[in-house]
Image (tube, helix red, strand yellow):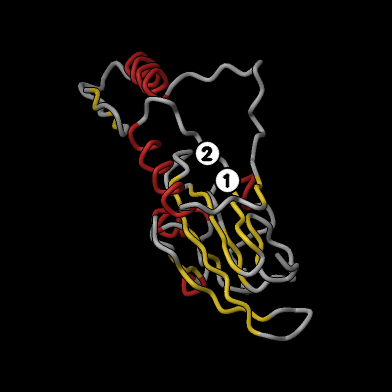
Amino acid sequence: MEKGLISVDRWAEGSQAYFLTNLHTDHTQGLSSTWAMAPIFCSRVTAKLFPFKFPNFNLSLLRVLDLGSWHSLSLISPSTGSKVTVQVMAIDAYHCPGAVMFLFRGEFGCMLNTGDFRWEKNCERAKLAKEMLLNALKDDAVDVLYLDNTYCNPTFQFPTREVAAKQTMTLSLGLTPWARKIFCFTSQMHLM
């Protein structure tokens, strides 16, 4: 893909459209409440959370991408000045609320930017997201893969979401003996 069209989780000048995979600080460095360069494309959940992280942000600059649908963008080639169509699909990354991957396609081929993702083997939501990605690709190949493997190291031992939720509940109950009920919701279980 030609430089100057899009940026993913990068907030420097020089692109026509910007994409945000999630609202964690490592993905928003350089972004502020005074942003005015170009539209930011993100998930619906991220758009709803945006004002909490960036108060006074001009929300008219946010463009919501519904999961699993192709969206077309008309951009201008910086080198030729001609119109370039880029299609993009947001896919659930299951990392944190609103986190998505972006699948791009156009004359440049097919590009996948994973952002942070957490597709656990036995997670139904991750299985649905994987199916969505494979259906979007059909028989196409990913020509360029931007894989965020920051924590992909065998020395890291992360608990499953279920174990983490149970540990959080246990810790919360120990810290707040006055609480009679704590509700902890995950996509796979409901603890009370």
Rendered view: 161 above or below 125? above
Report whether 60 appears left or right of 112. left
Image position, residue 122 (x, y; %): 37, 25
Q: Residue at x 66, y 81 (%)?
A: 76
Q: Choose top left, top right, bottom left or bottom right for residue 191.
A: top left
Q: Residue at x 39, y 56 (%)?
A: 68
Of 78 and 13, nearer the camera is 78
Q: How many marks?
A: 2
69 and 139: which is toward the camera: 139
- Looking at the rendered structure, the kind of residue marked 2 is Phe
Residue at the bottom extreme, as displayed: 81
Residue at image mark 1: 114
* Quadrant of the rendering where the C terminus is positioned: top left
14 with respect to 187 (left or right): right
Image coordinates of residue 167 in percent, x first then y, are 39, 16
Mark 1 residue crowding within 10 angstroms, few (<14) / some (14–19) / many (20+): many
Tell me whether circle 2 and circle 1 mark residues in contact (CB < 8 Å): yes
Q: Secondary structure at mark 2?
A: loop
What residue did someone put label 2 on?
117
